[in-house]
Amino acid sequence: MHYTAARQFYEREGHLTVPRNHVETLVLGDGEKVQERREVSLKLGAWVGNQRTRAASLSPERLEQLSAIGMRWA
């Protein structure tokens, strides 16, 4: 779910320089029925920072995913 939030942030802002305290809201559900949709708030800034810190232990697939949406590793 955090990756989806990171992609949403990147598509909106054009970068992944996310402030550490930033919270990103995702709307989940099919969108056809309002009662089936729900909002989820994720601490995206902390998550992005943690991904950078743990880059050496991330899978090659995760590194590629994040690089594709503009992650700066240094």
Image (tube, rainbow, N blue to C red):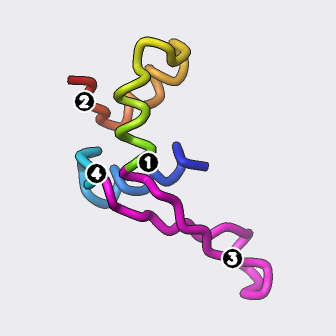
Q: Distance between the residues labelled 2 and 1?
A: 14 Å
Q: Which of marks 1 and 3 is nearer the N terminus?
A: 1
Location of mark 2 (residue):
72
Is 40 a magenta residue? Answer: yes
Is 68 a magenta residue? Answer: no
In the image, what residue occupies the spot 60% across and 70% down?
Answer: 27
Which residues, given as a range, are shown in magenta?
20-45
Please state which of residues 20 and 12 is positioned toward the viewer in this rendering: 20
Which mark's residue is nearer the viewer, 4 or 1? 4
Where's residue 11, x and y in %?
A: 35, 53
Where's residue 1, x and y in %?
A: 61, 49
Q: How far apart are marks 3 and 2 (CA)?
A: 31 Å
Residue 9: which quarter of the image? Answer: bottom left
- Going by the image, does 71 lie left or right of 23? left
Q: How far apart are marks 4 and 1 (CA)?
A: 12 Å
Q: Earlier in the sequence, mark 4 or mark 1?
A: 1
Where's residue 17, x and y in %?
A: 23, 46
Label 3: element kind: strand
Q: How far apart are marks 1 and 3 (CA)?
A: 19 Å
Give the residue type that dot 2 points to. Arg
Please state which of residues 5 and 30 is positioned toward the viewer in this rendering: 5
In the image, what residue occupies the spot 33% across and 60% down?
Answer: 21
Location of mark 3 (residue):
38
Location of mark 1 (residue):
7
Q: Which of marks 3 and 2 is nearer the N terminus?
A: 3
Q: How far apart are marks 4 and 2 (CA)?
A: 11 Å
- Going by the image, does 19 lie left or right of 55? left
Give the residue type that dot 4 points to. Val
